[in-house]
Image (cartoon, rainbow, N blue to C red):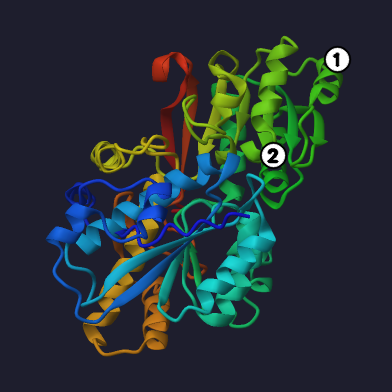
Amino acid sequence: MDKRKYGALAFGAMLVASACSSGGGASPAASESAGGGASPAASESAAPASKGTLKIGITLPISGGAAADGVPTLKGAQLAIDAANAAGGVGGYQIEMVPLDHAVNGKYNESQGAADLQVFVATPEVVGVVGPYNSAVAKVQIPIGNQAGLLQCSPANTVEGLTKPEFGALDYRKYFPEKINYIRVAATDDIQGPAMATYAFDTLGLKKMLVVDDVTTFGKGIADNFQKKFEELGGTVTDRVGADKDTVDFNDIITAAKTKNPDGVYYGGVVTSGAGLLLKQLRQQGLTIPFTGGDGIKNGSGKDKGALIQIAGAEAAKNSFATLAAIGDFPARGQFEKDYAEHFKADAEFNTAGAYSGPGNACAVIILKSLEEFLKANPDADPAAIREGVRAWATDTSHKFETVLGTETFDENGDTKQPYISFYTVDPALKDGLGDWVYKEQINFTKP
């Protein structure tokens, strides 16, 4: 596989507004050919680093069909890294961003994800990692990071069992159960699945749903949570079908489901598992009923190769609804999207912020802030001490992080204390008639 190391694309803003001062970033391919490094404007304005280089790893699926998920998330993190380098680095160090691609044949791959995290663990200069995107990859990465004491911040993982002990999280941090190394800014599926069930039942007025999942950790789990809540509300699941992530023909499932007259469909899974093909084939069989799902189906506009809307077509994607397991309408959203577009305006693809670009930026900022604070008190620490210091600072429940998403804090399990779920629908008229997702509303599920 082509494991693209996007070099030192340099890392982003403590203050998002400063990101645009780094003067744009090269596309992943361009950065690779250029050998990495900060963008030209960043290099010109940055003070020389006196202590050398530290690294932030990025573990995402960033090739093939998975690029629509991973690349915009990566670029969100890049904004933060570029801006920090433009401001002179952190504690005397320049920061190198080292992305590794764990997509194989266009789909996320757990074994490759494990191998990539081992690379980061074995690289002393890596002080923290942004990612992964998919919960199945997190399951194999968290134990590796826990044993090594390497901090990970996921912008997008949602399976509740990754962090919450009552759902089996201690199995993933068995080496040091009380030493949290994994944090996330995304809400969990025990919130996300029920949120869409309530939205479908109460807001969309759906009462009979066909539920399909991709038989993965994430897909089956979120579909289970959706079904449980939907039935509690009084809804009926007419069929519950598992279609594994290599499925390309859903016609038999659709034909059988039509006999029971569902008034909506819920898909638990990701686009690379077939969500776009399912939607396309539903419309081809004449079912124009609402198509709903979790954040796995919201992965770009009709202009983005591999996005659900691009695969299904704008008209087919009309009447689709998705949740995002993060705050969608954050106060700095307009400025962030403007900065992102300016920074990546030279890129042929993915020059518009994606669903998890903001959370990716937030994760990078959290790692950078933790590094900054540790180095203030320990300016001469060696790489091993820095790595542990970053982990300990980031996971301290008393610490707060000012990010593009707002103030982030983490609980004793590493979960965000601000679990938002946002709702989106497709407008087929956007992007010159190719279609795009439109924000509708959001709910904060913080417990009183």
> Residue at the location (51% across, 80% down)?
149
- Nearer to me, 210 or 417: 210
Which residue is denoted by mark 2 in the rendering?
A: 273
Q: Is residue 207 left or right of residue 85?
A: right
Q: Secondary structure at mark 2?
A: helix
- Within 10 Å of the Cα at label 2, are there few (<14), some (14-19), or many (20+) other Cα atoms? many
Q: Quadrant of the N terminus?
A: bottom right
In this rendering, does residue 334 appear at all?
A: yes
In this rendering, does residue 233 appear at all?
A: no
Q: Secondary structure at mark 1?
A: loop
User: What is the x, y in percent for residue 257?
Assistant: 82, 21
- Within 10 Å of the Cα at label 1, are there few (<14), some (14-19), or many (20+) other Cα atoms? few
Q: Is residue 44 left or right of residue 398?
A: left
- Nearer to me, 143 or 71: 71
- Nearer to me, 278 or 160: 278
> Residue at the location (30% across, 42% down)?
340
Q: Which mark is residue 259?
A: 1
Q: Quadrant of residue 444?
A: top left
